[in-house]
Amino acid sequence: MAHRLFSLFFGSLSVTVLLFLLAVSGQAQKMQSDPLGTVRAGKTACPNTGLAGTACYILDVSCSRIQDYVVYLKTFAPTNPPIGVVTLTNGGTSTALYEDYTYGSVTIQNLVAAGFLAIEITFGNHFSATEGGWQTNAYGAGVRAASCRYATVTAWIKNNLASQIPLCATGISAGSQQIAEGLAHYGLSQYLAFAELGSGPPFNRTDEACIPRNGRSVEYCSGADRGFGVDPTDSRRYIDPAYPGAWCSHDTETGSADHQQQFLEDSVTSPDAVLSYPGTKVWFLYGGKDDSTAVNQGENYRLQITTTNRAGCVPEAPHLIPDALAGAQQIASDTIGQCTAGRASK
């Protein structure tokens, strides 16, 4: 009888432990990120035009489900050892340099003057806009899969150029899309202490960007009455290249929902997105003259984040915020103030 009670007790305990482990496993599954890729890195000559870089790098990035791609880094070092590292990524295809914005050089120079190592990330062929861009995806796996390149480069920068100091990131438009995808799906909160997302992420809800169904609303900062849909020209340039064909522009122009499920899964705020970033302070910045739907898309993401975040506005700035002097200065000021030690440590 005692043996039977002993067996029943420990059998019941085993079931309890099993249920607990299953629950923990379920939470772990929710927090598990898409796998990062690998990098083969080396130094390369900096371009002889534009701002004079301190050092430049060539990174051969390999990720699953997409073809290998070469990414370039142009760095600007302060006089003394840096107190932090800040990456800057252009929008669109991200083949241009951040300094190509009208006042992009002001952001970089202000960061360097404050003691930060500034790093421009570009997907252009040896610092020129002659390659497809970050979305390029010969296998058609989508924008989420393509975002592995940016996330992998960010992890490499943390481990190799910012191992003992905070790493922070800022990006404009599709540059902010890459940061957001990295936070939601690739675990970038382990690496970034601060991120400022400018004008986006512009297709956070990729399904709503390509198949607009949500109603219109008045956007934060700009006051424009907009929805979520991306302009067909932009969808052809910046979303279609990640898919097997003209998926987004086709659905936008015809109103079909042929690819809705794939677009939903590729969204920053997909059903399996991680929206808690205890290691990263995330700020959003919009332009008061932005007449696109990027503000609504960005706010949709921001309002679902459960950890520290904030929205800011530069009234005189357009969609490309560093094209306004006040916008370029605001990005530098925000990053200098928030890129501090004691957050991301990996």
Image (spheres, grey):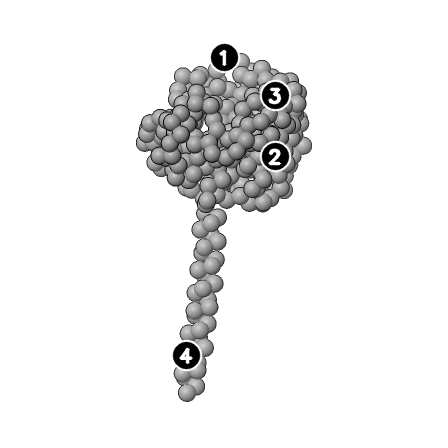
Q: Secondary structure at mark 2?
A: strand
Using a 10 Å C-alpha cutoff, classify the residue at mark 1 as few (fewer than 14 neighbours), some (14 to 19) or many (20 or more).
Answer: few
Residue 216 or residue 292, whichever sits in front: 216
* Residue ID for mark 4: 7
Q: Against 3, is 147 above or below?
A: above
* Residue ID for mark 3: 289
- Who's the residue at 45% across and 56% down the image? 25
* Residue ID for mark 2: 283
Which circle's residue, 4 or 2, is located before the other in the chain?
4
Which circle's residue, 2 or 3, is located before the other in the chain?
2
Q: Secondary structure at mark 4?
A: helix
Residue 210 or residue 272, whichever sits in front: 210
- Between circles 1 and 2, the one closer to the viewer is 2
Residue 251 or residue 122, whichever sits in front: 251
- Who's the residue at 47% across and 34% down the image? 213
Locate residue 133: give its quadrant.
Answer: top left
Give the left or right position of residue 246, taking residue 123 as reference: left
Check disc 2 and give the amino acid type: Trp
Q: Secondary structure at mark 1?
A: loop
Distance from the alpha carbon under mark 4 to that under mark 2: 55 Å
The answer to whether residue 276 is seen in the rendering is yes
* Residue ID for mark 1: 48
Residue 328: which numbered mark, if any? none
